[in-house]
Image (cartoon, rainbow, N blue to C red):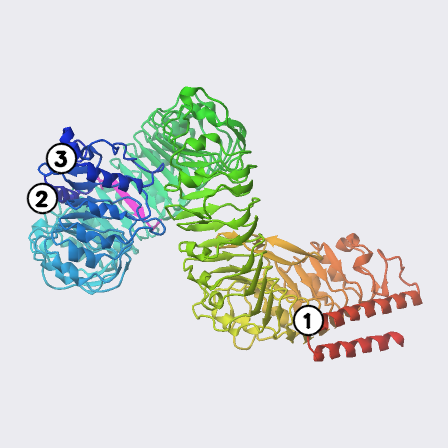
Amino acid sequence: MACVVAWALQLFLALLIQSVTTHPLHHPPATGGADANLHLDQADVLLKLKQSFLFDSSSISTLPSWQVGTDCCLWEGVGCSNSSGHVTALNLSGLGLHSKGIDPVIFDLTSLRMLDLSGNDLGGMTMIYESPSNGFERLSLLTHLNLSKAGISEDCFKAIAKSLAHLRVLSLDSCGLEGHIDHSLSRLHFLAVINLSNNYGITPGPFPEFFMKFTNLSVLRLAGINLEGPFPRTIFQSKDLRVLDLSRNLNLSGQIPKVYSANSLETLKLHMTNFSYGRPNYLSNSTSLMELGLDGKNISMDFLSSFGVLASLNKVVLTRLDSLREIEWTFIWIDRGTTNLACLEFFECDFSVTVPSFGNLKNLRSLVISDSNLTAQTLSAVANLKTLKSFTINDCYILGQLPSTVGNMSNLEIFEILSSDLSGTIPHEVGQMQKLTSLVLGYTRLSGRIPSSIGNLTELTELVISDSHLSGEIPTSLFSLPALKELILGENQLSGPIPEFSVVSSNLYLIDLSTNELTGQIPQIFFVLTSLRYLDISENNLTGSVDLASFWRLENLTHLAFSNNKLSVTEGEVRNSSSNYLSGLTELGLADCGLIKVPNFLMRVIRITSLDLSNNNISGDIPKRMWDIWRSSLISINLSHNKFTGMELTSYVIPFRNLLDTFDVSWNRLQGQIPMPSSSASYLDYSNNAFSSVLPNFTLYLNGTNYLSMSKNNISGSLPNSICNAYALENLQLAFNNFRGVIPACLIENAFVSVLNLRENHFEGALPSNISSECYFQIIDLHGNNIEGNLPRALYNCSVLEIIDLGRNRITDVFPSWFGGHLNLRVLILRFNQFHGPLDYLKNGKYEKYFPRLQIIDLASNNFSGNLHPQWFQLFELMETYNNTGEYYTKAGFKETIITSYKGSYMTFEGILTTFTSIDISANALEGNIPASIGKLVSLRQLNLSQNYFTGQIPRQVGGMSALETLDLSSNMLSGEIPQELANLTFLVILNLSNNKLEGRIPQTRQFLTFDNSSFDGNVGLCGPPLLKQCGAPDTSRGAHLKSSTDNVDIVLFLFAGVGFGVGFAAAIMMKSGWIRKRICI
């Protein structure tokens, strides 16, 4: 028995039969040639519509019957009038079709009475067709419109109300509707079915009371559309209201809605609302109510008991049960008040407080628990339900492991646990569920081996154990399951070879073993699985040679992925009868497969949607067939990391019909002007080539682009202001080119991108100061340009800023202490500029926290001066806690590149580990003692205070900086002995204390035994290994002379660095250098 009778669908078909006389949609009677001629125009329209669809492995149908020269009334999903022969019905529901919007050609079918495009993906990322609402005026005869879950995001209330006066069924579930539910819909008083559910963008507002006046209303579904306020006290006028769904409107309140006839009501869903539950007398002992949804927030035993016995109740949905009392009341009521309950669903409930009493639910067939807390004991209680056929757990926290008692559910057919925090192993007893047809365990923390007992599940058609931590080898028995159609084991740590097997399910059409640790060769049996449509074994460690011609038997194959293994893919010869092998492919992944040319068979493939040939050794030109033949189908193409030298083009605007998801030709040897896809691409990457120019109007082709990279080319010229018209752009990468001129002010002021990388160009001028208060910058990298002037204070508006690199520019300003209030700032690089003045300490100033997440601060080679505050190093709270769990910091799907000093030299980091911490304030004019507070930075890995004027002793607290790998205090005026505590720095790799005034014995333990003379040179008072000077030996004049020479060299370097920084800084250096010379000459 089904959980819910689909009354809406039944009504839909009944109304269709009454209003439209058509041939059946899938088995119409044959018609003669004259009738076929009548349909030529309409057939042409339908064929154009078919051309707008994309088909892939997820498509249920490719509309094979839609062929030129055949009668369109015989085509799949098409219905025609017996009297006129016109197409009056088009039902393409749930076929898995893809497109970038609804092609307006559909509005040429002006005789349509029924249009159903639901359950497809017709919206894409950005539609290329005009808004569908603009064509409805041509479909004035339409009585049934269903665009639910079709991927269409459109506010079309007014257009529908204006044009479709005869509409009887309107279904726009999950259509991304926005704005208010327009009052113009009140004109559609013939409506019997209204479904506007799951449109979360609808503006919050009251229940549209005019719906209550529709006398023909039978189905009203308004779940999850932000209804709020009290529900009207009036009564629904329809005498035949069967379905009323107001669920998931959290702020909708009032009493339970009143209906004209309680005996007609079959579905009432009020869960996740704020209705007050009185005694619903009109529903007591109802014989028609089949589905009921209630919320636990306002539930009581008195209310539940007032229902009496609901003998017809088939399904109950309960939400927000989070107390022991609510749960006990609910199960008492279910036990006493329902006799035929078959389906039970729980959302946002807390079953960790008690184990529910499932034992008395003798007729339960389906159980769903979602977004809830539960325990292994709860699962054991469910396992006692012998009649259960379907059990689904989704987005739950499960305390404990999957119990072995699950094997007791001998009648279970569907068992799913998805996106849940479940650990432990899969029990062997799962193999006892002999009637199981679908086993899905995805996105969990399950570990251990896949039980071989699953091979006993002979009725299994779908096996999904993915995105978890499963290890070990794949049991051979899985491939021999006789009914199996889908086998998905991707995203685990499975190892060993893919087993060879002789017996295989003739029904197996999908195999996904991607992203594991599988080894060995591809089993030969894969080449003869004639039913196979989808094969993905990418991201493993498979070896051997694979001849693409070996797949000649797999005529149904549409998806093939071998990427990122250790395979060598070749293309051999086949006999003529098999020359069209793989011609039906729509998706191909051969990244890192050792290819030296584009496979020849691709020249025969008519419709490719996704192609990945990256990380190979393919040279020559990119063939024009990719642009000419696939322009209508291609969605994603990745040719990066090859040796392509050119592109066969007839125009630098490539005429793709669809908005591409990916267009990646990076890391090749391409030259000349950068070509642009005419329809734009979400991800555009031309980086690491030898391109020299861009189209003058290239920004016209960025209307749907989120990521654009042209970094590391030879592009010159200026960046046009029109770049700011690319409103979808989030990540702009133009680094390492020859762009000149001023950065477009709008790019900084509007701050609509998250990542702006213009590193190593020749941009000049000052940064604009009028930056939007809605600043989205997360990363700003202008390193290595000619930016001058002050740092705009309005950058403070960029509250989500995490990385800013302005190194090697000409910025003249004081230390930007106002950045300290940025709670997310991780990296601050200002090196090689003309910053000056003291390094402020504002811990007790304007901000409660000051640089709380900063992990890299690089202020080297500026003009900062004065003493460091004793607590200055305590500003960096993140460095005060030891962190050894390093992960790469990523933003917008890429690893940021920074250049900073590391272990004594400047290095480029492709990605920033969260554990990498560094402070570099070298080559400035800082003086005074090094604050002892530095010792609290226990997670600091690199410290460079060299080439300053620090005096006094090295703080012994430095010895407590246990993570320190590099310590450079050279070229200062530090005195006293080297603290013995420094020997505790067991991770220290580089130590530079040279050119100071240190004295005494060099420590002779631990890390100090690994350093050579260069770490200590220029300290005349130091003695002991590795220096030749023995402790107790007198100083020599030669040593004093060497020290004097070193000081003079340092002074010259500082003076050179000071040129152009202002007279005040130069004078200060002269005074300090004179003081040094005076001391030396005494």
616 vs 834, left or right, is left
Q: Quadrant of residue 584?
A: top left
The amino acid at mark 2 is: Ser
Q: Quadrant of residue 937?
A: bottom right
- Magenta span has 366? yes
**Is residue 355 shown to the viewer in this render?**
no
Badge number at residue 23: 3
**Where is 670 relative to 954, above or below?**
above
Determine which residue is flagged by label 1: 931
Viewport quadrant of the N terminus: top left
Q: Pinpoint residue 312: horizontal percent, then vertical percent.
A: 13, 44
Q: Pinpoint residue 509: horizontal percent, then vertical percent.
A: 36, 30
Pick the front one: 212 or 659: 659
Pick the front one: 520 or 117: 117
Q: CA distance from mark 2 to mark 3?
A: 13 Å
Is label 2 in a helix, a strand or a loop? Answer: helix
User: Mark 1 or mark 2, which has the lower sequence index?
Assistant: 2
Q: Residue at x 32, y 34 (%)?
A: 438
Is label 1 in a helix, a strand or a loop? Answer: loop
**Where is 334 relative to 1079, above or below?**
above
Q: Pinpoint residue 765: horizontal percent, then vertical percent.
A: 57, 70
Dot 1 and dot 2 residues touching (CB under 8 Å): no
Give the crowd class for mark 1: few <14, some 14-19, many >=20 residues within 10 Å.
some
**Is residue 873 shown to the viewer in this render?**
yes
Q: Which residues are magenta?
A: 361-373
Badge number at residue 19: 2
Q: Pinpoint residue 863: horizontal percent, then vertical percent.
A: 68, 72
